[in-house]
Amino acid sequence: MKCPFCGDQESKVVDSRHSDDGLSIRRRRECLACQRRFTTYEIVESLPVIVVKRDGTRQGFDRNKIINSMVRAFDKRQVDAADIDRITTEIEMTIQNSLDREVSTDKIGEMVMERIKPLDEVAYIRFASVYRRFQDVSGFIHEINQFLEEK
């Protein structure tokens, strides 16, 4: 690791700690040439994931879109923000750990629905109504009936 102060390539690790999010490691290093200390972060390099939308267009994966969709579904419902973040992280890790570099919005929607279903029934139905694009009341009633049968 190159020292930011003197540019020397030799340093030793003085301290290592996991970051708060658990996704990186914080390392305190000491330059062997000038003895000054500096901090580095080590993270797992993730490959870019492409999301294939229903109309066939492609765009980069954006976890904020999942968060925003769940926030709308949980509007005026009792849900902890940590649950939304946990679900989003689970989905993101599942996608990253798959061997596929492309994922459909349908697959992402299904992953969201299976995770919010046990948290809040109303939020589940709200999310399903947007995700499944109900055209009329009968589609909405059909989804509710399926949900009740599974209970």
Image (tube, rainbow, N blue to C red):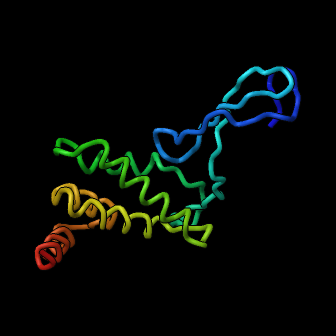
Quadrant assignment, res 8 = top right
Q: Is residue 47 above or below residue 39?
A: below
User: Which of the 4 quarters of the picture holds residue 136?
Assistant: bottom left
In x, y percent, where is residue 84? 33, 48
Toward the viewer: 15 or 87? 15
Residue 131 or residue 122, whichever sits in front = 122
Number of marks in the rendered image: 0
Q: What residue lies at 50% left-to-right and 68% top-to-bottom?
A: 104
Q: Position of residue 71 (x, y in %)?
A: 31, 45
x and y, in percent, of residue 97 in the image:
55, 66
**The N terminus, quarter of image:** top right
- Residue 77 % position (x, y): 17, 45
In the rendered view, would you say 101 is above or below 37? below
Give the residue displayed 64% in from the left and 36% down from the top.
Answer: 27
Looking at the picture, does residue 64 appear above or below residue 60?
Answer: above
Q: Relative to 6, is 64 above or below? A: below
Residue at screen point 38% across, 66% down: 111
Q: Residue at x 82, y 28 (%)?
A: 32
Looking at the image, residue 138 sits to the left or right of residue 53; the answer is left
Is 126 left or right of 25, judged from the image as shown? left
Q: Quadrant of the C terminus?
A: bottom left
Q: Is residue 41 left or right of residue 81?
A: right
